[in-house]
Image (cartoon, helix red, strand yellow):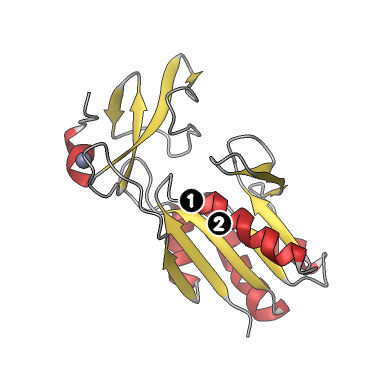
Amino acid sequence: MAVLRFSYGTMGSGKSTLALQIHHNLAVRRLNGLLLTKLDRDGVQVTSRLGVSAPAIEVGGDLDVFDLAASRLPLDFVVCDEVQFYSAEQCDQLARIVDELGVDVFAFGLITDFRGLLFDGTRRMLEVADERVEMQVEARCWCGSRATHNARVVNGKVVYEGETVVVGDTNDDGAEPLFGDVVRYELLCRRHYLAGDMGD
Ligand SMILES: [Zn+2]
C-alpha cells in the first residue's frame, strides 16, 4: 500500500535535509521519483541549510500535481518540500497520487507561520495524511528551550501581522532588504515569541 506521509517542524528542524536524503536514498536504488518544491529560498531546487541541494520542479499556484505525477509514470515516489505553501487542492492531489497511482508521497512542511497559525497547506496535510511525523531534530530558542515558533523579525523587532508568504532566512547574514525592510526569521520558544524577546 502506498502511503502519504507528512513530516512537519519549525524552520531549522532539518526538513529540507531529510527531503533531500530520502530523495537521494531512493534514487540510488534506481527508483523513479519526483522532487517538488514551492518558493524555495534559492529558486527551483531544494536547498538544505547544511549546503546540499538538488534540482526540483517548482509547484506553481495552478499546477495540478496529480496530472504532473500521472504524466511521469512509471513513478515510485514523490518528495515534496515546502508543502505548507501548497493549496488545499494541491494537498488533495497528493492524496490522489497515493490512492489512484499507488505512488508513495513524502511531504515536508513548516507547522506554523510567524503569527503562530497553521499554514493552509499544513492544515490540509494534517487532515489528509496517512502518517503525520513531527521532525525529531529539535530547534532551540536562545534560552535553550525547545523552539516552537518561527518569529518574523522586521528591522530587528518581532512582528505579529503581515503577509503570510515572505521568504527569508534564519541567519543574520542571509537577510535581504524587502520593500526597504530587513526581514529575517528567528526560532523562539513560545514565551520569548510572545514577549518579542530575542535575548539581545
Ligand atoms: Zn526562549
From the viewer's perspective, is residue 48 above or below residue 65? above
> How many numbered circles are shown?
2
| Crowdedness near tag 1: few (<14), some (14–19) or many (≥20) residues, C-alpha within 10 Å | many
Residue at the spot x=30%, y=49% of the render?
148
Residue extending farthest to the top is 180
Q: Amino acid at mark 1?
A: Gly
Residue 2: image quadrant is bottom right
Q: Cα distance, mark 2 to mark 1?
A: 6 Å
- The amino acid pointed to by label 2 is Leu
Badge 1 is on which residue?
14
Secondary structure under badge 2? helix
Q: Which mark is residue 18?
A: 2
Q: Quadrant of the C terminus?
A: top left
x and y, in percent, of residue 15 in the image:
50, 53
What quarter of the picture does the N terminus occupy?
bottom right
Q: Is residue 82 visible?
A: no
Q: Quadrant of ligand 1?
A: top left
Task: Work out whether residue 59 or residue 28 is closer to the camera in this orientation and state it.
Answer: 28
Some atom of ligand 1 lies within 8 Å of the CB belonging to the residue at label 2:
no
Report the residue that reaches farthest toward the bottom: 1
> Could you tell me residue 131's position as x and y percent?
48, 74
Q: Position of residue 106 (x, y in %)?
A: 59, 65
Left or right side of 194 for 3: right
**Residue 112 locus on image (x, y percent):** 37, 50
Residue 74 seen in render: yes
Question: Closer to the camera, 157 or 124?
Answer: 157
